[in-house]
Amino acid sequence: MENESETETAAQLDRHLERLAELLPDLAGALVLLLAFVLVGWIIGRALGSLVRRRGDRIHANFVSRLPVWIFAFLGVLLATDLLGWENLAAGLLAGGGMTALILGFAFRGVGENFLAGFFLVFSRPFRIGDLIQSGDLPQGAVTAVDLRNTHVRTADGRDIYIPNSIIFNSPLINFTRDGLRRPTFTLGVDYRAPLPEVRAAIVARVAGLEGVLETPEPRVTIASYEATHVMLEVWVWIDTFRGADFALVRTAAMEAARSAVLDNGWKLSADVSSAVELVDGRPSESGR
């Protein structure tokens, strides 16, 4: 009895080995086909990534280089299953793809929304790595990376913010460094008795020579408002961040230069005017002018 059972088991094992031996060529062919498709996708991805990377856009290069691999891998799986004679499985994958996508869409609606938003962000190109952006009411920061779910932004004070792509896609987006130009602005109060045309010219001449301040567009000084004891001037300078100009440092240097331009010519700043002028009904008195 035991001999009969052992014999039957050996026979079944032989049959399985025969089937496996018959299937091995098809398995090898399917595996080669799948690897070939993955390789083709990898080559195309590398080529597209290199092409995009030459334009200095690492965000799009990384995304474009990965997308063909997944597409060709999926096609390779379909053709490999067809080569093995598993037509029903291949047809099921194609027919069930829509239903699967629908089910997964409801189950992972947030993930899918962020993925699609990331896809459109990559190809709409609203920002690049290193750009200073602000999305909605969130703090502004430099773009560090973009993946399928979120965008990594690092603020000036060292905070790392991971913003879901759907928020950036659906909210107003400000790109401060799209063309590299930024405009530091500040105000400065001077005495009513100071000759304003000369004050403005002196400030422009002083800040125009600062390192990092562009000649074109040229610096400007305009009257911002008339206060009770002084005239408030607004100073504009332009910088090019692509040339390495630091916004905060250039703004500070411009503020110091504007202050020196006023004091060196003997004019008074708003703090000195406020302490020296006698006010009558909120206006400078005749004796204080």
Image (cartoon, rainbow, N blue to C red):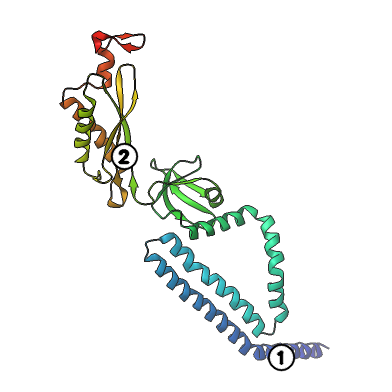
How far apart are labels 2 and 1 at the CA level? Answer: 79 Å
SS for dot 1: helix
Q: As drawn, is 55 to the left or to the right of 39? A: left
Tell me the crowding category of disc 2: few under 14, some 14 to 19, or many 20 or more residues within 10 angstroms, Cα based: few
Q: Nearer the viewer, residue 235 or 8?
A: 235
Q: Which residue is mark 2?
A: 248
Q: As drawn, is 202 to the left or to the right of 185? A: left
Q: Nearer the viewer, residue 54 or 37?
A: 54
Provide residue 101's location: percent of width, then percent of height.
67, 63
Identify the residue at horizontal 49%, vertical 58% (top origin): 124
Name which residue type carries label 1: Asp
Tell me the quarter of the image containing the C terminus: top left
Provide residue 3's location: percent of width, then percent of height.
79, 90
Name which residue type carries label 2: Ala
* Mark number displayed over residue 68: none
Quadrant position of residue 104:
bottom right
Identify the residue at horizontal 65%, vertical 54% (top origin): 109
SS for dot 2: helix
Q: Nearer the viewer, mark 2 or mark 1?
A: 2
Q: Is residue 286 above or below residue 64?
A: above
Tell me the crowding category of disc 1: few under 14, some 14 to 19, or many 20 or more residues within 10 angstroms, Cα based: few
* Mark number displayed over residue 14: 1
Q: Nearer the viewer, residue 219 or 126?
A: 219
Check the image and name the residue furthest to the right: 1
Provide residue 190's location: percent of width, then percent of height.
26, 23
Dot 2 or dot 1, earlier in sequence: 1
Tell me the quarter of the image containing the N terminus: bottom right
Identify the residue at horizontal 71%, vertical 69% (top origin): 96
